[in-house]
Image (cartoon, rainbow, N blue to C red):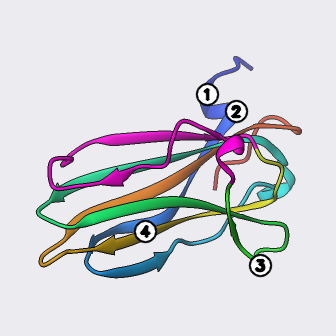
């Protein structure tokens, strides 16, 4: 079988596409060991739609057990988690994860919004210890 990104990576939604207004929203948990793949690498991908106002700070959180969450330290990130403003419509942001925790999720915190903006995020997990990666 020919090796391709399809065999080495899998995208999982963490923040569904939605209009974000003031407040914080925790994303869905992504298990880096799903299907016993034991992914050794991950990347947060954030997509902005139309942003009318407000500040939308995206952070990446990690957990050993899927219940006790901490923000990923800057030393364990490749790039910087974005803060999206009204001038940032229709952009894609990528942030690499270098940490060793099993579970990841994105968090969107919006402040100063009247109408807000549309934001979504996914986690691309890859380089599994067992290949090829299972797509379900």
Earlier residue among tags 3 and 4: 3
71 to 43, vertically: above or below:
below
Quadrant location of the C terminus in the rendered image? bottom right
Q: Residue at x 85, y 48 (%)?
A: 38
**Dot in front, 2 or 3:** 3
Report if the CB atoms under discs 1 and 2 are less than 8 Å apart. yes
**Dot in front, 1 or 3:** 3
Earlier residue among tags 2 and 3: 2
Indicate left or right for 4 with 110 as reference: right
User: Could you say which disc has been placed on residue 5 in the image?
Assistant: 1
Q: Residue at x 71, y 73 (%)?
A: 69
Residue beneath label 2, please? 8
- Foreground pick, 9 / 57: 57
Q: CA distance from mark 3 to mark 4?
A: 18 Å
Helix, strand or loop at label 3? It is loop
Q: CA distance from mark 1 to mark 3?
A: 31 Å
Q: Residue at x 19, y 71 (%)?
A: 116
Residue beneath label 3, please? 68
Mark 4 Cα-neighbour bin, 10 Å: few <14, some 14–19, many ≥20: many
- Foreground pick, 11 / 14: 14
Residue range in magenta is: 73-98
Q: CA distance from mark 4 to mark 2?
A: 28 Å
- Foreground pick, 79 / 126: 79
Report if the CB atoms under discs 4 and 2 are less than 8 Å apart. no
Report if the CB atoms under discs 2 and 3 are less than 8 Å apart. no
Q: Position of residue 111 (x, y in %)?
A: 29, 74
Helix, strand or loop at label 4? It is strand
Residue beneath label 4, please? 108
């Amino acid at each position: 079988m020919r090796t391709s990104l399809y065999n080495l990576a899998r995208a999982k939604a963490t923040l569904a596409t939605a209009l974000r207004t003031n407040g914080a929203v925790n994303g869905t948990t992504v298990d880096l060991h799903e299907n016993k793949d034991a992914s050794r690498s991950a990347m947060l991908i954030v997509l902005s739609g139309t942003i009318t106002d407000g500040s939308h700070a995206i952070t990446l959180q990690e957990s050993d057990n899927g219940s006790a969450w901490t923000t990923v330290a800057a030393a364990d990130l490749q790039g910087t988690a974005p803060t999206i403003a009204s001038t940032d419509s229709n952009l894609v942001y990528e942030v690499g994860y270098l940490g060793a925790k099993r579970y990841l999720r994105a968090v969107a915190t919006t402040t100063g919004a009247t109408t807000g903006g549309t934001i979504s995020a996914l986690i691309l997990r890859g380089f599994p210890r067992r290949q090829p990666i299972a797509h379900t």
